[in-house]
Image (cartoon, rainbow, N blue to C red):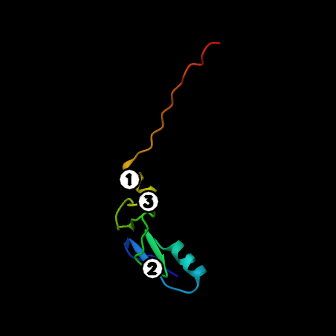
Amino acid sequence: MKFSVLDFGLGSGIHTEDINKAIYVADRLEAGSVWINTYNDFHQNMPFGGYKQSGIGREMGAEALDNFTQPKAVRIKIKTPKI
């Protein structure tokens, strides 16, 4: 099977009675959201955003915070106190 041949990958829907096949296909789709036996069903704690040419970053969910933060490593050498 060939999946995700389009340049865009915002969302995709799968309708089937075989949940194992649905999970197999969902894992291979290059889409930011995959709905199984439903469509356009959002939850505020789930990230929303696309793959490929469907934009960058995520909205909603904890992953959305990554768009506004940058990791930084800071090391401080503190002298040990004399006893």
Residue 52: image quadrant is bottom left
Viewer-side label of 3, 2: 3
Provide residue 61's location: percent of width, then percent of height.
44, 59
How many labels, in total?
A: 3
Judge from the rendering whether residue 23 lies leftward or rightward of residue 32; answer left or right.
right
Tag 3 residue: 61
Provide residue 16's location: percent of width, then percent of height.
53, 86
Q: In the current view of this chain or complex, which residue is farthest to the top?
A: 83
Tag 2 residue: 13
- Residue drawn at 44 percent across, 76 percent down: 4
- Residue drawn at 48 percent across, 37 percent down: 73
Q: Earlier in the sequence, mark 3 or mark 1?
A: 3
Question: The residue tagged with tag 1: helix, strand or loop?
Answer: helix
Residue 39: image quadrant is bottom left
Q: Earlier in the sequence, mark 1 or mark 2?
A: 2
What mark, if any, has residue 19 been given in the picture?
Answer: none
- State if disc 2 and disc 1 touch (CB < 8 Å): no
Q: Looking at the picture, which amino acid does disc 1 mark?
A: Asn
Q: Is residue 5 above or below residue 64?
A: below
Question: The residue tagged with tag 2: helix, strand or loop?
Answer: strand
**Label 3 – label 2 distance at C-alpha:** 21 Å
**Label 1 – label 2 distance at C-alpha:** 26 Å
Provide residue 44's location: percent of width, then percent of height.
42, 64
Tag 1 residue: 67
CA neighbours of label 2 inside 10 A, class few (<14), some (14 to 19), many (20+): some
Q: Earlier in the sequence, mark 3 or mark 2?
A: 2
CA neighbours of label 3 inside 10 A, class few (<14), some (14 to 19), many (20+): few
